[in-house]
Amino acid sequence: MKKSAVIVSDAYLPKKKTLATRLKTNLPLLLMILPGFLALLFFHYKPIYGLLIAFKNYKFKLGVFGSPWAANNGMEHFIRLFGGNEFAGVLGNTLWISLLRMVFGWPSPIILALLLNEIRCGWFKKLTQTLTYIPHFFSWVVLAGIFRMMFSSVGPVNSLLGVFGFEPIPFYSNNTAFLVLLISTAVWQALGSSAVVYIAALSGVDESLYEAAYIDGASKWKQVLHITLPSIMGTITTVTIMNLANVLNAGFDQVYNMYNYSVYDVSDILDTYSLRLLADGRYEIGAALSFFKSFVGMIFVLGSNWFIKKISKDEYGIL
Amino acid sequence: MKMKKVLSIALAVVFAIGMLAGCNGGGQSELAKSYVDSDETLALTWLGYPTLAGCGEGTDTELLLEEKFNVDIKPLFYEQENFNDKKTMLMAGGDVPDFIYELDPVNVYNDVDQDFIAEVPYETIEQYAPTLYAYLNEYAPAAWSYSRYMDTNWGVPNVNHLNGISKTNAYRTDWLKAVGKEAPETLDEMHDVIYAFVHDDPDGDGKDDTYGYAMQSTHYQDFFSEFFGAYGILPFDWQEVDGEIVYGGLREECTEVLQIIADWYKEGLIHPDFVAGVTQETLVTTSQIGYIQKVSYQDESLATSQINTLRQAVPEAGYTYTLAPKGPDGLRGQRCWGLACHVASFGKTGEENVKVPRILKMFEGLFTDDALMTEVHIGKEGKHWEKTGASAGMYSYAMKDGYKESAQQRLAGLEISFAAPSFFSPVTPRKDLFMEKMSDSYRTWLDSYTAEDAVLTDAFYKVEIIPSTADYLEDLRNKQMKLMADIIQGTKDASAYIPEFTKLWNNGGGDIMLEEAKAQGDVLNAMYKDLGVK
Amino acid sequence: MIQRTRGEKIFNVFNYIILILIGVTTLYPLLYTFSMSVSTKLAAESGGLHILPTWGQITLDPYKLVFQNVEIWRAYGYTIFRTVVGTVGAVLVTCFYGYALSRPNLIWKKFFVGYITFTMLFSGGQIPIYLNIRDLGLINSVWVYILPMLISAYNTVVARSFFAGIPEALNESAKIDGAGEFRTFFQIIVPLSKPIIMTLALWIAVAHWNAWFDSMMYITDQKKIVVQQYIQRIVNESATERITDLGAAENAAANLTSETVKSGSIMVTIIPILCFYPFVQKFFIKGVTLGAVKG
């Protein structure tokens, strides 16, 4: 700021934005925030004290705050959780399955959305999109039953393999084969429903951009790279970061309904492990596990958000 | 035992009175009147066995009980999947019901820890429900362990008669004829029959499309249970052997059994999908297997029973029933859950002194008054049901139109099984009443195809009574089954079983559980002493 | 017609093939469930892929079982109520919050973002949530179906990212014209945001339609349960290994197995969704607009 030789009266300086003025200008926006704010306050934050249960010996009649702290400085339940022989293996399985689900499950809906985007035939596009969404509506109880029938060692898939001269694959008793089955069916089930948000994003892309690029002689591939992908990058990064909150949820419903003792070594995950611990009917250990999962999820969300902000120079990122 | 004789006479006397009372026809019987101790209508919040979901207030059964016992029942129905969660949340919020049904001993323990349920000394039960008390001591004294915690009693256990009856298996009659064999009695004979079923084309279609042995489910209780049972072993449970508590899976004979199964597998007699969990039902209906594990009584008059469904595809199909096969020492059996079922507990509401005696009297009334018990289960004769006296079918009665579907029964508050407790009757009907309600053919079937020596149960009925079970057992069991599966499929040798499993056992908390199991034996002994039993 | 290169033509063919393959695999469970839902006991227990029902082995008994009681219509009433009211309410609340977050000048923006993101990660647990619902007097109230689901972190953050993609120039020109925030939102932003609004509506409506857990947990008055919980009950009752297995035999008077009843219940749930889906779909799938003039 250049120092002026002339002293100017305050009336000509830009008005400092006081808190009051800012609130006034923001009032409509704050009013928009209000309903959601209150809803979360009453339904999510009011019971948030439950996080403490993981650290206490919860006696219902005393309430959470009145209950005594768990042994070992409140860490008794965490010790029980982490101290089991199985924990390391189970945690490893969970991370590994989560990672595989991400590696294959992250690009697939995007690719599906891009492929659908290229279809010119309107009814085919809509029909296919509808069909891909359907598996989302089936619970894993049902899907697991269907898969068990299809992939059994004397089932249709193995019979087909036999026709081509291959040996039957023991999907349900071989660790690797089971993982392949688990991950591919997981990706397949979520494919259509995950793609919806990308399809919606793509539908907002201005057609004239493609026309201009075509006139400039850009190939289809270049168009995708320079027009399509950047236009949905915001959605992609947002969804990715949000999904990382679930890093320790390796798909309990699916695993529980599909696994058996033969493939325990690779498919026993944190949630199925804790189910056994919960058999004695006490809540604290479930709370401890929840807390642990939330904590790790938070680390991943914060971490990925920071990373994405850094490499996109603050353009993307949710926080 | 002298106690037994005294009890039997007492029972007989009470039954006689009950019979006379029952003959009184409609209205409140003399005996029932004696259960009402005051003019005060007691309000009872009733959290019952979660079987009558959704039938709400004002069912016929509720009104019946209210009238008979001068109570005002407020029924609470929770779905079984979330029963424990909802019960806990209800009580955590401060509403403790007067009557609380507990599905597992573990729930009893937790509710005691949370100070939700009231202590019920044996003397109190004996005072207000003497017949029931005596019967439990006689018929299933081990059931009391379900309600015992910290050397005190916390409720009234009940039984399930079906779980004390041995399992029956069956072979396709037409297949037996086709391969020229008789229904097997021993394990060796079973081998020959299954071998023929797999290799000798029993369905006569010229194709090699039949399998041998498959299990009804992937639950550990069905896991090659006949084989282990032929040696008297329950591989996944606690057993008492020569006065000592041992884990069945560590017994030496397991090696021999596994060798037998592995040999069967090599000969192609075991369905290759036994690990993944092949559904026996589909295999049976499509005539892919001829051996049916744990078959239930087939009602030939019912068009949709399994046998008749099968006959739609294969008209000459039939079942030849057998008991579990005998092993070299004449032992046989398959796993049963044992008679003990659930526990009826009482909420610590501050009014237990008044309400517990009344509820106990309700139990006694239900237990001794056959007419009442019948009406609670299947309703009034003529309105809800009628006698059939049929010699086919499962029952000696049939539900009338308007009450045939389970949804309709629900709405009327009826639960038509006499073998188990129900929402409004947490007391199981006596075994002889249960047998009386059967049809002649079903009773004969049970006589011929079930046997006491084929009933194998965990030494404690429910293995979860051992506190560390939650931490260790299911895991160990899964590893154990995997090890067995490997041996059966030939990847490992049977001789590796004991050493490998022992290692798993020791590393997986086995000794802790063993200590607790032995301690539980002491708990049981102390309990029997308090009850004055054995 | 825009000319395609040879490479693009080949890609096009492969695209169709891949999508057809995916479509077929996702169609299969639907066909399987449909044919099981109309199969007799014999057909249901036979093996095979069940792509189509076996001719001559068709029965409507599973559907009859589901619809036989009046209770289901009452349950439908509650489900429809919550789906309509709940969706409208949640879309409004979510879009408001998400839009506000997308405005660059929002005061305390980081706080509001953190406020909602935290709820995605941490939760108080089943019992405190139940006690809270109870304290708010919502046990057995029909509003327990609507209020807790008014906003969720995932939906809001996704909405915000869509709103953020709308050029700021539009807001500024509206401001110059003298429009306040609300008017700008409803008259300019919303018409441009149909894809995300309909996507949210779809997600939320499906969630409401399929919801049963809150019904089971917080509603004890059996007259107020939603259709999903009612159907679950029917399915459980028909499961062949029941607590009292003698009782199941009586119920087998009809041509039912637990599989066919389960399949019937799934069809009953899915068919209404599939019927409404095309109406929603056209908002977030772009039709063929190649060559159209865009302003």
Image (tube, rainbow, N blue to C red):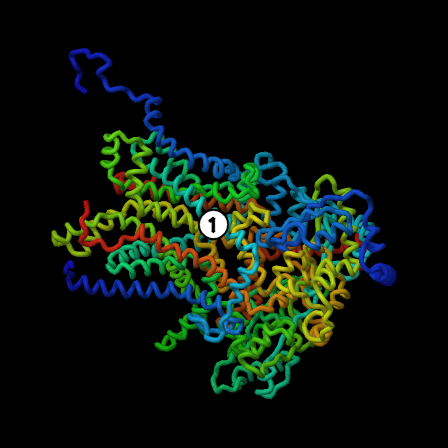
Left or right: residue B105 versus residue B280 is right
User: Residue at 56% of width from left, 51% of height from top?
Assistant: A277
Towards the viewer: C257 or C22: C257
Question: Residue B339: in sight, yes or no?
Answer: no
Could you say where residue B180 lies in the image, as x and y percent from the top left?
Answer: 60, 88
The image shows residue B534 at horizontal and vertical percentages of 80, 60
Q: Residues within 10 Å of mark 1 (few under 14, many from 20)?
A: some
Q: Amino acid at mark 1?
A: Ile
Q: Position of residue B79 (x, y in %)?
A: 59, 53
Closest to the observer, A142 or B243: A142
Position of B453 with respect to B498 (left or right) is right
Tell me what residue is drawn at x 34 percent, y 35 percent.
C100
Quick check: A68 left or right of A210? right
Q: Which residue is mark 1?
A: C80
**Image coords of residue A176 (percent x, y):** 41, 64
Determine whether B343 is above or below B456 in the image: above
Taking the image as shown, residue A113 lies to the left or right of residue A183, namely left
